[in-house]
Image: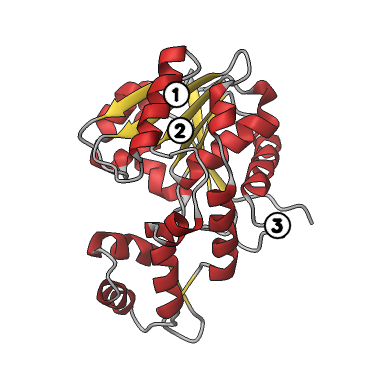
Amino acid sequence: MTFVPHFEIVAADGAAPARTAFVLHGIYGAGRNWRTFARDLVAEQPDWRVVLVDLRNHGRSQGAPPPQTLAACAADLVRVGEAVGGPPETVVGHSFGGKVALVYARDHGAALKRLWILDSPPGAAPAAAEDDSEAARVLATLREVAGPVARRSDAIDALVRHGVAKGIAQWLATNLVPREAGGYEWVFDADRLAEMLADYWRVDGWPFLSSPPSGLSVDVVRAGRSDRWTDEDVRRLGSLDAAGAITAHLLPDAAHWLHVDDPAGLRRMLVLG
């Protein structure tokens, strides 16, 4: 059976949008994380509809067949496009979803006109950086706090005891689902997520950004208070912007969760097409 990720279509009330944008969440997230932002965005740009995709092994997109790679995530988006009546003109990706968006543009982007990469450094990373990343630390903690748990608050408390910030722990707990026998368990398959993260760190998107195809507009947004970018990343981004290969943007008052920290600023910046 062909795997098609779960998705949700968001359109402005009373609108008949003719154009489609996909929005892709980060690791451990789901499309619902962007629902409020998407509703406000289409209210301002009603000729667009936004498709919120649950990337494979996230949210309601469980049971994805192997391989658990960014290329597989990108191929999933082709099937979402078929399900909604055609490929997107624009893809917006945050964090992990930003690199998925980049791979989609590289491998399947013939119809794509605009690519937005939100606080997602495009390069590969050495093993030391990979192991020390926040995503890797969260995954290790999720393995230790495997559940099931009686209450969501029990999982939040356990995550905090393992050094996860309370706000992130509360957000992660939205991925707990009720069990028939009582209590809650994680919707995640930790082994599959580990495979996805390993591939995320292997993929190097700089070559694509250095020479994007003609007709594709590429915008990269860096959050001013983000800790995801190295000095070398910032330098390379500036060089590509100066050369006209991409357009680099800075959202100065936002940290990594820029759609939460400064949603209005991001909406003003994010022209879908």
CB contact under 8 Å: marks 2 and 1: yes
Q: Residue at x 32, y 39 (%)?
A: 259
> Given the image, on which type of amino acid does mark 1 rest?
Asp
Residue 13 in view in this figure:
no
Task: Give the residue type that dot 3 points to.
Answer: Pro
Question: Which one is nearer the viewer's eye here, 18 or 258?
Answer: 258
Looking at the rendering, in which quadrant would you find the N terminus? bottom right
Q: Residues within 10 Å of mark 1 (few under 14, many from 20)?
A: many
Q: Which residue is mark 1?
A: 219
Q: CA distance from mark 1 to mark 3?
A: 29 Å
Tell me if residue 150 comes above or below residue 45 in the rendering.
below
Task: Give coordinates of residue 3: x percent, y percent.
Answer: 71, 53
Inter-mark Cα distance, 3 to 2 = 24 Å
Label 2 SS: strand
Q: Residues within 10 Å of mark 3 (few under 14, many from 20)?
A: few
Q: Residue 81's quadrant in the figure?
A: top right
Amino acid carrying label 2: it is Ile
Which residue is depicted at the point 40% across and 43% down? Answer: 34
- Tell me the quarter of the picture where residue 162 sits: bottom left
Residue 2 tag number: none
**Residue carrying label 2:** 117
Q: Earlier in the sequence, mark 2 or mark 1?
A: 2
* Residue 3 makes an appearance in the image: yes
> Badge 3 is on which residue?
67
Which residue corresponds to the image point at 45% horizontal and 20% vertical from the top-left? 240
134 lies left or right of 96: left
In this picture, is 247 found above or below 87? above
Q: In front: 263, or 117? A: 117
Secondary element under disc 3, as helix, strand or loop, is loop
- Distance between the alpha carbons at the discs numbered 2 and 1: 6 Å
Identify the secondary structure beneath mark 1: strand
Say whether disc 3 or disc 2 marks the residue closer to the N-terminus: 3
